[in-house]
Amino acid sequence: MTQATPARERYRQWPALVLGILFGLFYAYDLWEAVGNVLTLAGVAAQLGITLSAAAWVVLIVSTLMPIGIFITALVLGRSRGYVIQALFYVCGLAVSAATYLSLVSAISFA
């Protein structure tokens, strides 16, 4: 027999859900940006008649998967904490995602 969640506990869960959705949109934008770069660079390389190196493909794939992994990490680490701490985990994750993404994209020119 399952026990229904008390109304008070459901009331406490919705701000965490709103934070997750709000910051999830920012992470989704990072993901969209990375997918756009993969498609653009592959298209430009095809138009120029060249191929991207294996290192460039690794960098592009990592930069695509990175926002997903960082969002899940921020979600798990902030899950049992207060709302401000949850928001800080999401913001720090976005900063890490942006800094790492810029580092990876700059590494493509050396690959």
Image (cartoon, helix red, strand yellow):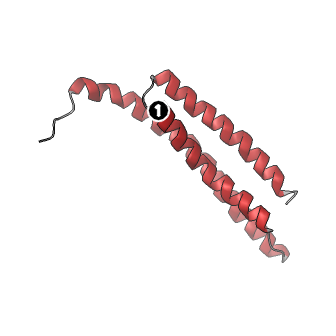
Which image quadrant is residue 7 in?
top left
Please state the horizontal and vertical placement of residue 105, each as a whole percent of the image.
Answer: 78, 52
Q: How many marks?
A: 1
Query: Which quarter of the figure has residue 65?
Result: bottom right
Residue tagged 1: 19
Residue 9 screen position, x and y as percent: 27, 26
Measuring from the top left, give residue 108's x and y in whole percent: 82, 57
Q: Amino acid at mark 1?
A: Leu
Please say if 101 is above or below 47: above
Looking at the image, residue 48 lies above or below residue 105: below
Q: Is residue 51 visible?
A: yes
Query: In the displayed structure, does residue 64 sit left or right of residue 57?
Result: left
Q: Element at badge 1?
A: helix
Q: Nearer the viewer, residue 1 or 18?
A: 1
Q: Which residue in the rendered view is the most extreme toward the left?
A: 1
Q: Is residue 86 above or below residue 44?
A: above
Q: Residue at x 17, y 35 (%)?
A: 4
